[in-house]
Image (cartoon, rainbow, N blue to C red):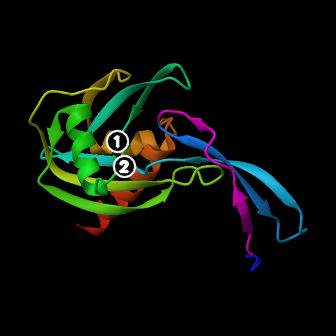
C-alpha cells in the first residue's frame, strides 16, 4: 500500500441534485505523478441493509423493481438513512416500511463504502432476530416491493450460486451468516 496521500485542492459547488444524491466535482492532486485531476463525487446519506430472521429461521426478502436494470431483484430490505436519523433506527424503519416486519433483537454487522469509486456514503448492515409481521407495508411512490420469506438454507444456496443481483445483499448475507455461525 502506498504511503502517498491524494490532496483535495478544492471542490466545486454541488452541481446537480439527483434526488437521492448530489454531484460535485473535486480537484485532486495525484501523489504518484503530481498531476491535478477533476473527478465527480456523488454525495449523500448513508444507507442500511437488514438481514431479518424470523422465529422459524426464515429470512425476510424484498423483491424490488430496480430502475437501473429494469427488472425485479430479490434482495434484503433496506434503504437510505434520513438526515439526522440513527443508522439502527433507519434499519428498523426501512424493514417495517418495506415489509411490515419488525424485530426485538438487533445486531450491528459493520459497514462498507456504498461504492467508494465515486460515492462518499456507507452501507450499514444489521441482523434482526425474532422478526415477525406486525404491520402493512408503507411504500414510497417509486417502490414496488413483493415480500416473501425464504428458508435460511435456501438463502445460503442462492448466495453461493451467485443468484443475487445486489452487492449490498451479498455483503449483508455473508456478514449475517458469519455472525449466526459464531453465535450471537
SS label for mark 2:
strand
Residue behind mark 1: 78
Distance from label 2 to label 1 (Cα)?
Answer: 5 Å
Q: Is residue 56 above or below residue 72?
A: below
Q: Where's the N terminus, which quadrant?
A: bottom right
Q: Quadrant of residue 5?
A: bottom right
Q: Quadrant of residue 179?
A: bottom left
Q: Is residue 25 left or right of residue 141?
A: right
Q: Which residues are magenta?
A: 5-19
In the image, which disc is placed on residue 47?
A: none
Helix, strand or loop for disc 1: strand
Q: Residue at x 14, y 27 (%)?
A: 136
Residue 34: x %, y % from top left: 89, 69
Tell me: residue 110, above or below residue 48.
below
* Residue 10 is a magenta residue: yes
Task: Write down the quadrant of residue 35 in the picture.
Answer: bottom right
Label 1 packing within 10 angstroms: few (<14), some (14-19), many (20+): many
Amino acid at each position: 500500500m502506498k504511503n502517498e496521500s491524494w490532496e483535495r485542492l478544492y471542490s466545486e459547488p454541488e452541481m446537480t441534485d439527483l434526488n437521492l444524491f448530489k454531484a460535485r466535482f473535486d480537484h485532486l492532486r495525484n501523489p504518484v505523478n503530481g498531476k491535478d485531476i477533476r473527478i465527480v463525487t456523488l454525495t449523500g446519506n448513508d444507507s442500511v441493509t437488514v438481514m431479518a430472521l424470523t422465529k422459524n429461521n426464515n429470512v425476510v426478502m424484498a423483491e424490488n423493481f430496480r430502475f437501473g436494470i429494469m427488472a425485479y431483484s430479490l434482495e434484503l430490505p433496506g434503504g437510505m438513512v434520513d438526515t439526522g436519523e440513527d443508522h439502527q433506527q433507519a434499519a428498523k424503519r426501512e424493514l417495517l416500511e418495506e415489509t411490515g416486519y419488525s424485530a426485538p433483537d438487533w445486531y450491528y454487522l459493520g459497514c462498507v463504502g456504498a461504492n467508494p469509486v465515486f460515492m462518499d456514503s456507507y452501507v450499514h448492515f444489521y441482523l434482526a432476530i425474532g422478526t415477525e409481521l406486525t404491520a402493512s407495508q408503507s411504500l414510497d411512490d417509486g417502490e414496488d416491493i413483493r415480500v416473501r420469506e425464504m428458508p435460511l438454507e435456501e438463502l445460503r444456496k442462492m448466495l453461493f450460486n451467485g443468484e443475487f443481483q445486489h452487492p449490498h445483499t451479498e455483503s449483508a448475507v455473508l456478514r449475517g451468516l458469519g455472525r449466526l455461525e459464531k453465535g450471537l
